[in-house]
Amino acid sequence: MSIGYACMTLGVPNATIKGCILKNFSNEKFVELVLYNLNSLKNILNYNISNDIRLFRISSDIIPFGSNEINKTDWAKIFYNELNEIGNIIRSNKIRVSMHPGQYTVLNSPDSKIVSRAIEDINYHSKFLDSLGIDSSGKIILHIGGVYGDKTSAMIRFSEHYKALDESVKLRLVIENDDKSYNIDDVLDIGTKLNIPVAYDNLHNKLNPYDEKKDDNYWISQCTPLWKKNDGPQKIHYSQQNKLKNNGSHSDSININEFLEFYNKLSGTKPDIMLEVKDKNLSAVKCINCTTNTKIIKNLELEWGKYKYSILEKSPNDYLKIRQLLKDKTAYPVVEFYNIIESALSQKKNFGNSLNAALHVWGYFKETATTQEKLYFNNLLKKAAENSTSFDRIKNFLFKLSLKYKQDYLINSYFFIPAL
DNA sequence: TGACGTCAAGATCCG
DNA sequence: CGGATCTTGACGTCA
């Protein structure tokens, strides 16, 4: 059982995926972007390894316009060395990677042009995983598509188009229930007939249920037999509803109590769990720390090091509470720890607390900073007090200082994540 | 025809 | 001119 997250990281330096718009596409731009993205992917994977995250979804944007006809480059050849190096990192560290074409890749469309684009896109995803030397446990997760007023024939069309795919692509394909059209029963029906593994998505099932009396564990068990040896461990998608947003919007963070309630109800072998959540790797680390057999306080101390200034900024009370909580070096109060973190992060910031946290971080530099840097920092504080600049600018400046003075402890701090 | 969802690139505005 | 903020893109389905 592994727990992972999708596509992008928060608070990891040099780990973003870049793209460009169609009209700016050129071969030179493309080469530049792919080199940049592959380097980011390498950094993400190394981050995952050091945080013991063994499940990761690679962004479909890793190769910009990977399946667009504008893109004539043989990228697998051009970037053979980079791709090979990344593949080695993945394989030697036993990370499981997957990909997930977006909602616009529709294999069952009645429009043959849309179908051929969908096939091109699925082929691109498969080729990317092939280029890393990943075996068939590296999955491509796909939705069934549209209904077009006639679900039965739309499902038949999916089956026919699926059968026409390359064998190597079929080995990777997994189908997933969606939040509007194809419920888990529909998808299990297709999966059983075509022998395709099914990834169960709990939030989609909540929004688009087949039978509300059946719980998550029931459906996950129903999917289990469809995962054969070559497919690797069963996978599911797990997410929670953002209560302030539309149905289907993912929560900012995984609420740990709700997750553990779900997790503890799972019977049999636990599946790989792909989290879909705004705070990405942060929730992955949280859920891993709460389910691991390695119950050592050092892991909580590492987490605390990253969270502490964000907590100080939101709630000095909770800051003190956690310091108290982590005093007993023989204990592992992980759930309590994250409960306080979640509660603190849900608080609103205020000027005094933000200033206090910023000054704590400034403490790392106030001796070593140049006169100019000191002046600039004080000027930013003054402007913030007058409300003529935001604390984000102060944070940006402090982050730049962290990089310049190589303060790794600060560079990895969640304090600098704007959304937090 | 616009909403849906997603994020950053690109465009524009502001001081 | 740099930084902040707004708009667009890229995709297909459905109301």
Image: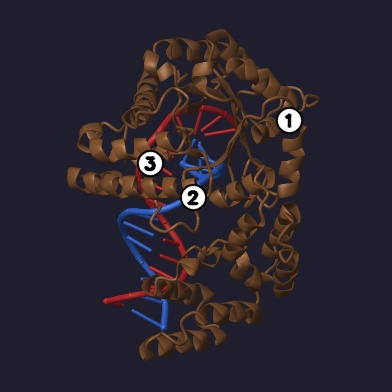
Chain colours: A brown, B blue, C red
Who comes first in sequence, dot 2 or dot 3? 2
Chain on which label 3 sits: A
Q: Is residue A275 left or right of residue A259?
A: left
Q: Quadrant of residue A1?
A: top right
Q: Mark 2 is on which residue type?
A: Ser
Who comes first in sequence, dot 2 or dot 1? 2
Q: Nearer the viewer, mark 2 or mark 1?
A: 2
Chain on which label 2 sits: A
The 10 Å Cα crowd at callout 2, few under 14, some 14 to 19, many 20 or more, is few
Helix, strand or loop status at disc 2 = helix
Q: Residue at x 21, y 32 (%)?
A: A77
Q: Is residue A371 visible?
A: yes
Residue that carries the numbered disc 2 in the rendered image: A50
Q: Residue A61, labelled with which disc?
A: 3
Q: Residue A392, labelled with which disc?
A: none
Q: Is residue A255 left or right of residue A115?
A: right
Q: Residue A266, labelled with which disc?
A: 1
Q: Residue at x 67, y 63 (%)?
A: A345
Q: Mark 3 is on which residue type?
A: Asp
Where does the image place residue A45, in percent across and percent down from the top left? 43, 45
